[in-house]
Amino acid sequence: MSGLTAGIRLAHFGKRVAILERHDRVGGLNSYYTMDGHDLDVGLHAITNFESKPGTTQAMRRILRQLRLKPEDFEFYPQKKSLITFPSASIEFTNEFGYMEQQVAEKFPGQADNFRNLVEKIKTSDLLSLTSSEGNARDVLATIITEPLLIEMLLAPLMFYGNSREHDMEFRQFAILFSSIFIEGIGRPKNGIRPLLNLLVDRFTDCGGELLLESGVKEIKTENGKAVGLSLLDGREFECDNVLSTVGRLETVALCRETATDGDEPAVGKISIMESTNILDRPISEIGMEHSITFYNKQDQLTFKSPDEPVDISSGVICIPDNFDLPERSDTRVLRITNLANCEYWLSINPMKNLPAKREWHAKTLDAIADQTTDISEKIAFTDIFTPRTIERYTGHINGAVYGTPDKVWNGKTPVPNIYLSGTDQGFLGIIGSMMSGISVTNGYLLK
């Protein structure tokens, strides 16, 4: 997503720009595929920064303006109602933020004023700046919210939807995701991620950009401390003036070989997931779930880290696309379950044991969500499962880390002066955040 929006901006201004995609379709972890006759999305639960009135949110206004698109180009539909559920309390939220404020006041009456103070702090922050963070989220939240359980409940959705660190997250990322998900709301494309990707690809190529699929990069060639070209896996060579890399901070440094070591030695990400896409043999309305997305945790303390077991079934996310406010109910009958997964286990597993292990842990995730719905194990007609092994294969992220390194580069700069980062490791996360990242880094450096 960030590569596509960056390419559109560059092509708009007459730059000669090529997007090199290793696979046979664009999107990375937010893409699509077909299996057994089913059209499936990868990575897409929802679009953040949803706008009930076109062009009202800051991020969407900027995307529309910068990409020269119209609100009607984005056919998104809002969530109905989502849920954060812990043993001692549950909070519902919709795209009307006042409803969440009411829920917090009802469930945590002593925190109503504190919650409003937190919201005011977030609303007055410059969330789109290419500058550094404001400290750790837990430290900042503890100075505003005095109920530990409420802090855990607010952290859970935001960590699952964009946190690359164990146990804690940067407050700035917390603020970005809080604003994107809770204040502005979430929606979903009517027909999944494919129409949005097609829209961006068409805009890029219509402006003169060149999209090269199945064109993986083997090396970024440097001379005298600057990038001068690219070598592809198939032997082709390109010359260039600048490189914008969306593959990640560590991964970009690795492509530069020894000529561009990163002195900060960023950490390898440990946060990864196992996700199952389950297609049921009956309408979603018959399984007893009304929420668009459910974030569950089986203890009152959130444990967000790479689990000791292959999969952490004590917390996770359940997403039901049919429970978004679509103009007409679809017949996909999809239920998606996402849990934290142990990268080391899934990357080192014997290939012969990979499928049996997937099935074993998928069954355990179904048992874990039984208290959120009826038993669906006998109602599943089709299942596909991906793990950190899949993520590493299709995104190139070292360790299968779904959100990259925990050491973000907010300014998008690398040790090589004409190589820039956008996407996950620049710091803007989610689909809308990724699109903003490509725009912001391009405007900040490549169009100067």
Image (tube, rainbow, N blue to C red):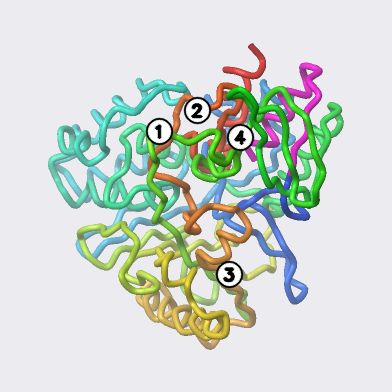
Instruction: Say the numbered circle drawn on residue 263.
Output: 1
Disc 2 element = loop
Looking at this view, is 269 or 380 the one in front?
A: 269
Kindly identify the residue that appears in the image at 80 percent across and 39 percent down.
237
Looking at this view, is 298 or 111 the one in front?
A: 298
Count residues near mark 1 (Cα–Cα under 10 Å), then give few for <14, some for 14-19, many for 20+.
few
In the picture as drawn, the residue positioned furthest to the bottom comes out as: 378
Residue 172: quarter of image: top left
**CB within 8 Å, label 2 to label 4:** no
Amino acid type at circle 4 is Met
384 sits to left or right of 162: right
Count residues near mark 3 (Cα–Cα under 10 Å), then give few for <14, some for 14-19, many for 20+.
many
Residue 20: quarter of image: top right
Q: Which one is earlier in the sequence, the residue at label 1 or at label 3?
A: 1
To which residue does mark 3 refer?
Answer: 277
The CA span between labels 1 and 3 is: 40 Å
Amino acid type at circle 2 is Pro
Amino acid type at circle 1 is Gly
Q: Which one is earlier in the sequence, the residue at label 4 or at label 1?
A: 1
Q: Count the labels in the image.
A: 4
Q: Which one is earlier in the sequence, the residue at label 2 or at label 4?
A: 2
Would you say residue 349 sits in the magenta stretch?
Answer: no
The image shows residue 306 at horizontal and vertical percentages of: 34, 61
To which residue does mark 4 refer?
Answer: 435
Kindly identify the residue that appears in the image at 67 percent across and 48 percent down.
27
Kindly identify the residue that appears in the image at 52 percent across and 80 percent down.
350
Disc 1 element = loop
Q: Which residues are magenta?
A: 1-20
The image shows residue 145 at horizontal and vertical percentages of: 18, 38
Q: Which one is earlier in the sequence, the residue at label 2 or at label 3?
A: 3
Residue 50 visible here = no
To which residue does mark 2 refer?
Answer: 415
